[in-house]
Image (tube, helix red, strand yellow):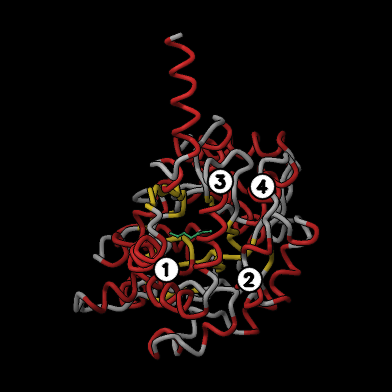
Amino acid sequence: MRRLILAALMLLASALPGAAQNTLHVFNWSDYIDPYMVDRFQRETGIRIRYDVYDSLETLEARLSAGRSGFDIIVPTSEPTFARLVRAGALRPLDMSLIPNARHLDPELMARVAAVDPGNRHGVIYLWGTVGLGIRPDRIRALAPDAATDSLSLLLDPANARRLARCGIAVMDSATDVLPSVLRYLGRNPDSGEQADLRAAEQALLAIRPFLRAIPPSSAIVDALANGEICLALSYSGDVIQAASRAREANRPFEIRYIAPREGAQLWFDMLAIPADAPNPEAAHRFINFLLQPEVMANITNHVRYPSAVPAARALLSPDVANDPSVYPDPAALAQAFVAGTPPPAVERARARLWSRFKGGR
Ligand code: N2P
């Protein structure tokens, strides 16, 4: 009898618009939204957002593979993570009738991610960007005056790294988002799983390892650059541009600049997606639809300095963001850019091992 009453009560609770029904659990990259937009969604809908962050695809994948994540919204990069989730059936197909604002999306950009998600059924682009260098031009001019500042050689030529070690160098902690750029710099296939290529990448990384101050989570690089603790970093475009604006706001006596390497920057697209087992898919759809409003997207880009896939948002940006040439990469940089693929599991494991040897400096 007790058990029956309990079952009846539970049934009742799930039918009521109770706590679980009214909560949306978001798992997003750090520094990747305008917090006022989170508040606004909560106020407009009465849905409470529980917001957690990660700062690498490795962390996101680990949390998801543990199972039953409880997340309603995740923001995986189209390749490799989103592609893997689509293939594994781990995402819920989107109900486009609940996302009328998807009409604002740039069809050309959406076509690019359809390569891994036929028909764009499981995700829409949130923000996009590149992987490149954050630099402090004043320190680099002083310590390595002859070094090219538009090339990954600033970091990966050991002669440069040796000279710049004094002002602080950091490489974000992510095999997935660093190795493709290293391979590309070496003139190799960025997706390669060939032993010879991986060995070459490892050697290149080990050769600069003694000169690195840190291999921190990507989220730590923003402040380290803005505070002047480091003068060179490999990280995500918008994170560096956020650092530049934080340095300006704090009246630092130096400038931070973002460099998309001339060897070709890795271009990536981050997707809004709903896990197949999301507890609150209805709220997740509402959130996606909310985010895709041009005015909301403009606020987000103003705040995080990453471009969106909503062209109408561009006219609504604040002038300093709209006029910053590094926020929306110019056509020349885009033509040079490459998109990384989705390495098979064995290659992924070899890369992870390479990365831990690099971190350990052996
Ligand atoms: C934000 C990181 C950007 C996402 N801190 C990289 N795909």
Q: Nearer the viewer, mark 2 or mark 3?
A: 2
Can you give x and y, in whole percent of width and height, for residue 325 in the image?
49, 85
Residue with the mark numbered 4: 92
Disc 2 marks a residue whose amino acid type is Pro
Is the distance from the Cβ of mark 4 to the nearest ligand 1 atom less than 8 Å?
no
The disc, 2 or 4, on the residue closer to the chain's N-terminal end is: 4
Ligand 1: does it lie within 8 Å of the C-beta at label 1?
no
- The residues tagged by marks 2 and 3 sit, at their Cα atoms, a distance apart of 37 Å
Give the camera-side residue of 262 and 328: 328
Q: CA distance from mark 2 to mark 4?
A: 18 Å
The quarter of the picture where residue 242 lies is bottom left
Residue pointed to by mark 3: 175
Residue sitting at the far top = 1
How would you rate the neighbour count of disc 1 (Cα within 10 Å): few for under 14, some for 14-19, many for 20 or more?
A: many
Q: Helix or strand or loop: what does disc 1 sit on?
A: strand
3D distance between C-alphas at marks 2 and 1:
37 Å
Q: Amino acid at mark 1?
A: Gly
- 90 lies left or right of 45: right
User: Looking at the image, which residue is at 26% across and 79% down?
Assistant: 248
Residue 33: x percent and y percent? Answer: 41, 64
Tell me, yes or no, if residue 279 can be seen here.
yes
Q: Secondary structure at mark 2?
A: helix
> In the rendered structure, which disc, 1 or 3, sits on the residue that comes first in sequence?
1
Circle 1 is placed at which residue position? 134
Q: Label 4 vs label 3: CA separation?
A: 28 Å
